[in-house]
Amino acid sequence: MLTFTGAAGGDAGNVLLLHAFPVSAEMWEPQLAPLAESGYRVVAPYVYGFDSSPSRPGWSMEDYARDLARLVEALGWSSTTVVGLSMGGYQALAFYRLYPELVDSLVLCDTRANADSPEVLAGRQQFRQAVMEKGSEEAAARMVPNFFAKETYASNQPLVEKTRESIIRQAPEEISEAMRAIAERKDSTELLTRIACPTLIVNGMEDIVTTTAVAAEMHALIPGSKLELIPEAGHLSNLDQPAMFNAILLEHLQSL
């Protein structure tokens, strides 16, 4: 069973929060209490091998989706809204592909549906090698500067350092495994056209990892979807501008 953090709310609905690479479910801390206080039962699972979650060498996005379904069943939930940011978005799409009947709605944040190009794949392999040679600090050095809006990165050092620490405490082997699973994920572009549940796309306006153009392309393909762009937010838009992110997410949930 996947390890998770969460908060007990009321009976307004269920929310599954899927975290980004290579941080942990800790990234959802600004969302847990506000969602619970608004009546939602909310759970944020850890990916395999991160923090206290069991390791699973060779895992795929589909493996993770199946374990998410087992978690939903164990929680006694009949269905849930699935919120995925970056890598969590890949997992959310894999979950919807396998278990559309369990999904009340999708919230796809700072993510993409298309598979990697050969150039991106080569870069991912080089990243894996560098992390295995130099340690988790290498992953933090490469990723953290691209996570936040310029103003946040310059002025909010406690947030930047906390994010860095959430990466360096992960084992290099587990970071490498997660990157391999990302590289091997299925292309979900065609799936977007078949999504039949309410779908919200959220993207930081200063996200240089998955740009607003990528978000707009997804929005155009998902029938009836809604696109929300958050100003002064980078790739981890939920951490960059938590109040705005929470307001957008709660408005979506309350519209269901």
Image: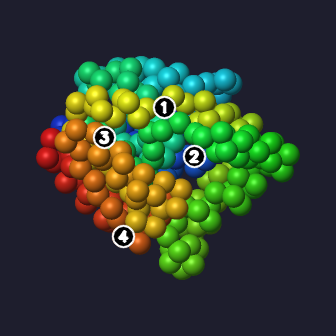
Q: Is residue 2 visible?
A: no
The tag earlier along the polypeptide, 4 or 3, is 3
Task: Identify the disc placed on residue 28.
Answer: none
Q: Are marks 2 and 3 in contact (CB under 8 Å)?
A: no
Residue at 43%, 28% in the rendered image: 94
- Residue holding disc 2: 21
Task: Identify the disc placed on residue 231.
Answer: 4
In the image: residue 135, left or right of residue 79? right
The tag earlier along the polypeptide, 2 or 3, is 2
- Mark 2 and mark 1: span between their CA atoms? 18 Å
The image shows residue 30 at horizontal and vertical percentages of: 40, 58
Task: Identify the disc placed on residue 221.
Answer: 3
In the image: residue 180, left or right of residue 233? right
Residue at 55%, 30% in the rendered image: 185
- Mark 1 and mark 3: span between their CA atoms? 14 Å
Residue at 61%, 24% in the rendered image: 59
Considering only vertical position in the picture, is 241 above or below 154? Answer: above
Q: Is residue 90 visible?
A: yes
